[in-house]
Image (cartoon, rainbow, N blue to C red):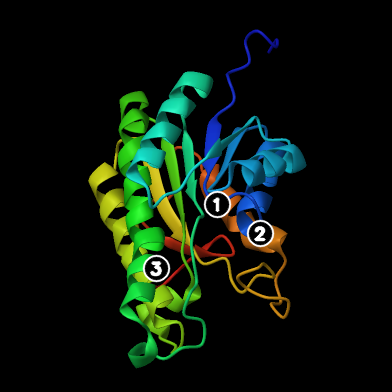
Amino acid sequence: MTGAERPAARTALVTGANRGIGLETSRQLVERGLTTIVSARDPAAAARAARACGAAGAIQLDVTDPASVRRCAERCRTDFGAVDVLVNNAGVLLDDERRLLEVEEAVLATTLEVNLVGVWRMVRAFVPSMLARGYGRVVNLSTGLSRLSAIETGSPAYSVSKTALNMLTAQLAAELRGTGVLVNCLDPGWVRTDMGGPEAPRTPAEGADTAVFLATLPDDGPTGLLFHDRQPVAW
């Protein structure tokens, strides 16, 4: 196959990609030949991340701001044509180690706005064009703390937001089954990032591996599941 005949690379957008798992996911996607766009709330941080991982572009994006999401989608259309892969990595952990009755309502509201509503905004902005082309991969970053089959205490707002994200993933996958758009989420494990802290046993590369696996699934790949280390696990 000549260069002229080679199909165009898929385009991926990674949210919260200025550090940690998001940055590492972007780096691995670039390595696999995807045209990768990194995004972050701080445009300077997004630009630094793009230089660090070799991404094709950097975009300012605040998933809590509907206007910012719209601008991001328009910029992607204008500069890159289409987004084939959406990695919803942006997230917050604001109630680490707190018990449920101790979490302030403002903390709960912010957590849900970023971890759940922000993802909902992103899929509404990007999935319709995937459907129009008959191809898409949506990857949502969840956590082991989201699993109803293995409930742990601590970080209740974070855990509840990610359990809700699991349902969003399953619902969207069910609606899109047979369209060519695959939707999955993953538990990356406890990873050494700003969120995970220095005592975490897993590297960002290990945390990003399953995200990249799901972002590059074949057409007959799974949809509507929660994965850990490339294997489906119980909700």
Viewport quadrant of the N terminus: top right
Residue visible at 49% across and 38% down in the picture: 85
Residue 140: percent from left, percent from top: 45, 55
Instruction: Indicate which disc, 3 or 2, sits on the residue closer to the N terminus.
Output: 2
In space, the residues marked 1 and 3 are separated at their CA atoms by: 15 Å
Which label lies toward us, 3 or 2? 3
> Is the residue 8 above or below the residue 102 in the image?
above
Q: Which mark is residue 192?
A: none
The circle drawn on residue 16 is 1
Q: Is residue 84 above or below residue 195?
A: above
Q: CA distance from mark 1 to mark 2?
A: 9 Å
Residue 167 visible? The answer is yes
Q: Would you identify the image quadrant in which residue 71 lies?
A: top left
- Mark 2 crowd level (few <14, some 14–19, many ≥20, 10 Å Cα): many
In the displayed structure, 174 sits above or below 130; it is below
Kind of residue indicated by mark 2: Gly
The image position of residue 210, as x and y in percent, is 58, 57
- Circle 1 residues within 10 Å: few <14, some 14–19, many ≥20: many
Residue 188 is left or right of residue 179, and the answer is right
Q: Earlier in the sequence, mark 1 or mark 3?
A: 1
Q: Is residue 9 above or below residue 95?
A: above
State yes or no: discs 1 and 2 in contact (Cβ < 8 Å): yes
Residue bearing mark 2? 20
Residue marked by disc 3: 111
Question: Callout 3: helix, strand or loop?
Answer: helix
Q: Amino acid at mark 3?
A: Thr
The percent position of residue 149, horizontal first and vertical second, equals: 38, 81
